[in-house]
Image: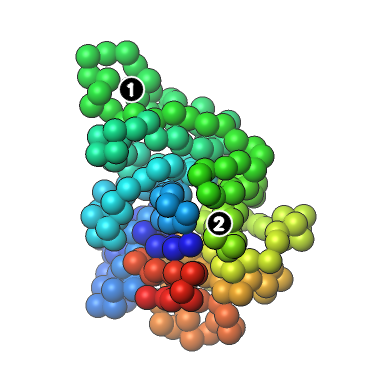
Amino acid sequence: MKLTFLGTGTSHGIPAIGCTCDVCQSDNRRNRRRRSSLYIQAGGVHVVIDTPPDFRDQALTFNVARVDAVLLTHAHADHIFGFDDLRRFCFLQKMIIPVYGSSITLASMREKFGYVFEDSLWRKSVPQVTFCEVDQPFQVGALQITPLPVPHGPMQVYGYLIEADGHRVAYIPDCSAVPEELMTALPPLDVMILDALRDRPHPTHLTVDQAVDALQRIGADRSYLTHLCHDLEHEATQQRLPAGIHVAYDGLRIDLSRECIT
């Protein structure tokens, strides 16, 4: 199983428009964060989790050459507004791409992207997708995928557990808590990726300390923080984290079959 972090930033992206803070002005490429998304390759299947506004740039920059399926965590703008760029993959692959999510997420997608389902002369120019509502484990080729319901402030969103090639990865980019029952139900993980917006409390996201506490309790072999805002400088944040917990960055690649990180 191979993982590529396409984006690790919060909704504004970093640098944020009009901001002159040290992180937004930094020359360290690991402080430049597109909106959060993850690309997974396993068993000949290529899956994207979320299609943020930066999706086209992410695909070009990190060589996303194929998308066999899309998993949506929720329908906030920073996670879906690159959805129309699936058109290119539909055209290249000559296929209808399945898009998985909760009933609430997909209902919102139908409202925001209603033109995808319209019968018109322009039908072939829009994404050719099918929406698949899920609330139980399901298969995408060789991947076994389990939705992980978590609170994101007052709403419920999904993270996902992905199992393939003898490896297990969990990805929860947006949440305000990790429920106790979810932590105890997770199997042993190779990689756990979790929301850690900033140090100051936020009503819909975990702080770094809250994320670290949850990650230590989950106890994955390797853990990563994502969905970071410009309050967090990459190197300074990494230096204060416990062993085994890392700050993710755009373009980070993990090849679990080779135990390789680049």
* Residue under label 1: 115
The one nearer the camera, 127 or 248, is 127
What residue is shown with label 2?
164
Q: Of circles 1 and 2, which is in front? A: 2
Instruction: Name which residue lies at 23% across and 26% down.
Output: 125
Q: Is residue 16 above or below residue 234?
A: above
Is 48 on the left or on the right of 209, as rendered?
A: left
Question: In the shown orientation, is residue 127 left or right of residue 155?
Answer: left
Image coords of residue 123 (percent x, y): 27, 20
Q: How crowded is mark 1: few (under 14 residues within 10 Å), some or many (20 or more)?
A: some
Quarter of the figure with residue 89: top left
Residue at 76% of width from left, 61% of height from top? 184
At mark 1, the secondary structure is: helix
What is the CA distance from the residue labelled 1 to the residue labelled 2?
34 Å
- What amino acid is at disc 1? Tyr
Quadrant of res 93: top left
Position in image of residue 207 (x %, y %): 57, 66
Q: Residue at x 38, y 69 (%)?
A: 252
What's under tag 2, amino acid-wise? Ala
- Judged left or right of residue 14, residue 235 is right
Quick one: 188 or 201, which is closer to the camera?
188
Instruction: Indicate whether 55 appears above or below 259.
Output: above
In-front residue for pair 202/104: 104
> Which mark sits nearer the N-terminus, 1 or 2?
1
Q: Are marks 1 and 2 in contact (CB under 8 Å)?
A: no
The disc label shown at residue 46, or none: none
The answer to whether residue 208 of the structure is visible from this angle is: no
In the picture, which quadrant includes the C terminus? bottom left
The picture places residue 1, in percent across and down from the top left corner, at 48, 62
- Residue 20: where, in percent of width, then height? 27, 69
